[in-house]
Amino acid sequence: MPGIAQRPRAARRLTAAVAVLAAAAGIMSAAGPAGADPSAPAKPHPARTVDVQLLSFNDLHGNLEPPQGSSGTVTETQPDGTTKAVPAGGVEYLASALRTARKGHPYSVTAAGGDMIGASPLLSGLFHDEPTIEALNKLDLDVTAVGNHEFDEGRAELTRIQNGGCHPKDGCYEDGKTFPGADFPYLAANVTDEKTGKPILKPYTVWKHNGVKIGFIGVTLEGTPNIVTAEGVKGLKFHDEVETINKYAKELNRKGVKSIVALIHEGGLPASSSYNYDCDSGGPGSGISGPIVDIAKNVTPKVDALVTGHTHQAYACTIPDPSGTPRTVTSAASFGRLYTDTTLTYDRRTGDIVRTKVKSANHVVDRQQPKAADMTSLIGRWNKLAAPIANKPVGYVSAEIPGRGSTAYESPLGDVIADAQLEALSPADKGGAQLALMNPGGIRSDLAYAASGSEGDGVVTYGEAFTVQPFTNMMNVIDLTGDQLITALKQQVSGSNQASPKILQVSRGLTYTLDLTKTGADRVVADSVKLNGEAIDPAKTYRVAMNEFLAGGGDGFPAFKEGKNKLVGASDLEAFTAYLTAHSSASTPLAPPAADRIKIVR
């Protein structure tokens, strides 16, 4: 069974503060022998409550450098109601922000909500995310849940990330250095081995300092197998988030731990995209929706706060627990652009959190503050190793091409990527593709116009292209009937995708209408689906290109699993970079496309 773990590092960090507390408590420096003077005043007892600072963030995805394009900003609502984009993120600034926030807080613990690694820019992804783990160690992260992207390279690699050791194929990256692993626990309470039934990593840990004990339970979303390649979750079983958390909350209580925080890699969608939106303001259309709402309403009242993630949204809300008591639920967007500061008032007598006093808010990791020198050094060291690959120009753009940062169902960069895949796989000997489809979640960034280094504005480097398409998924071409194709398009807005639609990005020539006034599968107007102006024939067979993740039914598209005559092609990244090189030059850069292939009816 998992034991109660104490973080030596956290204890060291707080040693000096203990002395300050002792002095503040009025401990006499010259106390005489016990019983020497019965009339002497009794030694004062420590205060019954103490405020514990919980700093948290989520979905870093290896973004050590400030994210490119609009992925590197957060929306801030101004006093007059207008909004502005604030540049944010970068581990140099995140480290400074967290270290500044900890000052004056002798009881401070830092936790994360998963997806610290995976889908990472080249600086981290090229080295199997070892640079990010090194940075998180320096950040004094105390604990994190696993997210779905921690499984991108499978269980064995996640175990290596936790325990250390050089990569089994690529070896050690720096002479004389062996990767030490994460010196914080990864928690995977709801991920078990199919054969043994036991969690593959610790289900929980307990942070302790000076008599204060807070338990952390970590889970990823139960639907992880639907959004990770089959190889990544082979031999694993993912369990219900609520049942798992409730189970281990009881176990922690039996061990005398009454204060509990759940780290959940699943999230919600706030009514506003502004990080400083008042989630509890009330009124029509306010608050938060999405999977985390039902989870929060059913997680046992034994849990005092929920740190969440996955949706890359910013919120600090209260959602009532099963007893009706308000409970804080937070998420700090993604990519290290925000951190959440939550005050947990700990009652020494009960060992529990005084829930009525929990306060929480998100803060911008702005780029006006000084950079953390140790992070600057870390980035420089790894950049030097990556430079020969990362800095190679692969194309040119006339302006930023929005992808991850786009709020539209069809993004300009989505069109570019789908076109690149169609072009790569349309030759007869490459698969004979007639159309291509791209899952939106696989587009990890915008394609920035501003230079990321010394290459100059408008130049697209291999590193920037990798940031957009970091998975290096192999491309597939499969046979689908027209009926299967239309069924797949309907699955964008029905089944597991009904609550949160996943609109596929489409290659040139494929057009259809998405009617948002309707519900479920009816939102896709079947007779509007056309290829090169001709209606899709349900009985006809079409050659369709997509990445291997989608072809395996990932992201809630089981219709693609019915595809036949599969041909495996180049990787999605190869297709993307080849397209950029073929369709742009310094004198004729690629312009953002109109993104008008899907007609939206509202």
Image (cartoon, helix red, strand yellow):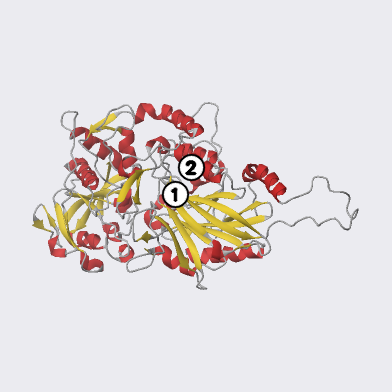
What whole-number distance in Å separates the C-alpha atoms at marks 2 and 1?
9 Å
- Dot 2 amino acid type: Ala
Position of 64 relative to 54 (above/below): above
Is residue 570 shown left or right of residue 66? Answer: left
Q: Quadrant of the C terminus?
A: bottom left
**The one of 101 and 242 positioned closer to us in this rendering:** 101
Residue 280 in picture, x, y percent from top left: 41, 64
Q: Mark 2 or mark 1: which comes first in sequence?
A: 2
**The one of 232 and 331 positioned closer to us in this rendering:** 331
Report helix, strand or loop for mark 1.
strand
Report helix, strand or loop for mark 2.
helix
- Dot 1 amino acid type: His
**The one of 383 and 74 positioned closer to us in this rendering:** 74
Q: How many marks?
A: 2
Q: Quadrant of the N terminus?
A: bottom right
Q: Are marks 2 and 1 in contact (CB under 8 Å)?
A: yes
Is residue 245 shown left or right of residue 152? Answer: right
Residue 194 showing in the rendered view:
no
Residue that label 1 marks? 363
Q: Dot 1, crowdedness within 10 Å: few (<14), some or many (≥20)? A: some
Residue 254 in picture, x, y percent from top left: 66, 65
Q: Which mark is drawn over residue 97?
A: 2
Residue 493 in picture, x, y percent from top left: 27, 63
Residue 133 in picture, x, y percent from top left: 50, 40
Residue 126 quadrant: top left
Q: Dot 2, crowdedness within 10 Å: few (<14), some or many (≥20)? A: many
* Residue located farthest toward the right when viewing the structure as drawn: 36
